[in-house]
Amino acid sequence: MSTFQAPKGTYDLIPPRSAKFLAVREAIAAPLRNSGYGYIETPGFENVELFARGVGESTDIVTKEMYAFETKGGDRLALRPEGTASVLRAALEANLHRQGNLPVKLWYSGSYYRYEQPQAGRYRHFSQVGAEAIGAEDPALDAELIILADQAYRSLGLSDFRILLNSLGDKECRPVYRAALQDFLRGLDLDEDTLRRAEINPLRVLDDKRESVQKQLGGAPLLRDYLCDACKAYHEEVRELITAAGVAFEDDPKLVRGLDYYTRTTFEFVHDGLGSQSAVGGGGRYDGLSEMIGGPALPSVGWALGVDRTVLALEAEGVELELPSTTSVFAVPLGEEARRILFAKVTELRKVGVAADFSYGGKGLKGAMKNANRSGARYAIVAGERDLAEGVVQLKDMESGEQTAIGVNEIVAELESRLG
């Protein structure tokens, strides 16, 4: 056993389970690629201030969970705790918003890092696929992203998830609500840290998961009662577009996402089979984030879906993904001449797109056939000196056990035909 282990709160993706993660990433990305979203990849670390400004000074992410460090050159950096701020920073730096085609539609996939207390579904290193539509204020764009996430989940076979929807208002109506909420919170029995948070961003208190806090919030004012006419109309159109697309959702007037940059539309995907870590993804509109990080006004909307939690949701529902076999053909050479010829044939099969593997290490027939079985291959090619002297190999169907002789020069065409 190795002297070293994966750090606390992290995990290794190992076959065969890793194939599920790849399939989930692909399923989430597929509808995005089909809807005009281009792939973007950003560094795993950024300037600390990017997250402090964008995510919010009062958030747990910034105050407690960020992996921040100082480089030898004196730069203050942080491992990225989320994707939106990095993607927007990259889009602004590359002037994508000035190329005359708004919104800029981007999708990404990667690892993110937060120093949290590890438990099932909550890790210090986790994987997300996200999407951002930058530079347009349009209810149809909000609806599009919610519909695409729903489409991705359903393509995987998930059915027991719910979409929660709310509006957080905008710079016109939210300050009035903020003041009313602060007045309410000041009258509660809250600890000093929570009261301090209420003065900076009172909506964050609504997102506090502690029972001692939640049980006092029953009579809290609701933002929906403070929305201005423009925000009401915007939210109603989002709801109508989602409904028309046949996507079910639940209005949740208490839904507050844990990041400061959200405005208007906010939503969350939850799966009740995951216990306390029920959120599998979420997002919303962030019309002021660009200005917060030094850019121009660029109203935008996006989401991030957790790959880890989506896999857990699939397992909770008992959904088995149809994963392609990693190996379709396994070659078993018996002797040096067979080794040379079958290795060449395996290379040919791979070139025409057939997943093929080879018995390495000079194993005997029994050991090599065990490897063939473990590989999950549909067919095994077996050849010894006598077979090659006759110009043939033995092709064995691993499901039926049927074995037939075929010409050495017919191997590739025969297997292409059988495997379709």
Image (cartoon, helix red, strand yellow):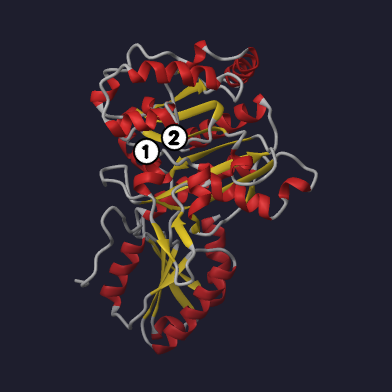
The one nearer the camera, 7 or 143, is 7
Q: Which residue is mark 2?
A: 157
Image height check: is 276 above or below 365?
Answer: above
Image height check: is 133 above or below 328?
Answer: above
Q: Is residue 97 left or right of residue 217?
A: right
Say which residue appears at 65% left-offset and 24% top-offset. 139
Proximity of marks 1 and 2: CB atoms separated by less than 8 Å: yes
- How many neighbours does mark 2 have within 10 angstroms: few (below 14), some (14-19), or many (20 or more)? some
* Residue 385 seen by the camera: yes
Q: CA distance from mark 1 to mark 2?
A: 8 Å
Q: Is residue 337 left or right of residue 277?
A: right
- Picture coordinates of residue 61, whole percent (x, y): 39, 44
Residue ranking furthest to the bottom: 336
The one nearer the camera, 410 or 131, is 131
- How many neighbours does mark 1 have within 10 angstroms: few (below 14), some (14-19), or many (20 or more)? many
* Residue 274 seen by the camera: no
- Picture coordinates of residue 398, whole percent (x, y): 36, 60
Say which residue appears at 57% left-offset and 42% top-offset. 131
Residue type, mark 2 in image: Gly
- Local secondary structure at mark 2: loop
Q: Which residue is mark 1?
A: 314
Q: Is residue 125 left or right of residue 227?
A: left
